[in-house]
Image (cartoon, rainbow, N blue to C red):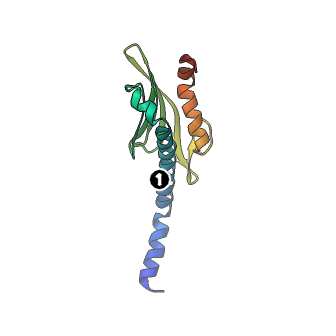
Amino acid sequence: MSFREEFIRRTKKIYLEDVMHNRARRSAEEMIYKYFDSLKKELKEEIEISSGELDIDIAEREFVRVNLDLSELFFELETADIEVRLISYDGNEKVEKLIDRITYKNNEYISVSYSVPLSYELLDLYLRKAFEKELNQFGV
């Protein structure tokens, strides 16, 4: 074995955990982006005519924000864990509530609140939690 091959093998061992963590993070972020980008495409016309009442904002590696009227679902991606918050407005007062923290554990990102891996079903649960009451108030 050449030293080049040995160097590669040993270096990969040194950085194995960091590489696995980085891959899991990219995978988690990609899942979030795909879910909300698809939602944004499905609601493109409604977003355009809503005068800002409905919007989906995706800033890769920073945040994903979905808002409908006075409710907002916000994913903070700039922190070590992915933080999920519900934001609402009571008059002029902004009310922010951390509803979950998605943290790296055993080579995947796991919801602290629900003890399950990040999935489309979990993202759907967050969406429901953020907007079901709001949609009911619209009478639909």
Q: In which quarter of the image is residue 132?
A: top right
Provide residue 16's location: percent of width, then percent of height: 49, 64
Quick check: 15 above or below 120? below
Q: Give the number of marks.
A: 1
Rendered residue at 58%/21% (across/down): 140
Q: Which of 34 and 126 is in front in this view?
A: 34
Note whether 70 is above or below 12 in the view shown: above
Residue projecting furthest to the bottom = 1
Q: Nearer the viewer, residue 131 or 50?
A: 50
Taking the spot 53% from the left edge, 21% from the top edge, the residue there is: 134
Q: Residue at 41% of width from left, 42% of height from top?
A: 79
Question: In the image, 103: left or right of 52?
Answer: right
The image quarter containing residue 88 is top left
**Horizontal and vertical percent for residue 43?**
48, 35
Residue 112 appears in the picture as rendered: no
Report whether 75 appears left or right of 127: left
Q: Name the residue under label 1.
A: 26
Residue closer to the observer: 76 or 50: 50
Please name the residue shown 58% across and 43% down the image: 120
Q: Where is residue 83 in the image (x, y as percent from the top left)?
A: 47, 37
Query: Residue 98 in the image: x percent, y percent?
Result: 49, 30
View extreme (top): residue? 91
Q: What element carries label 1?
A: helix
Image position of 124 with respect to 130: above or below = below
Q: Which amino acid does the dot numbered 1 rest on?
A: Arg
For label 1, count other residues whose C-alpha is less than 10 Å away and answer few (under 14), some (14-19) or many (20+): few
Q: Out of 48 and 12, give the one closest to the viewer.
A: 48
Residue 94 seen in this snapshot:
yes
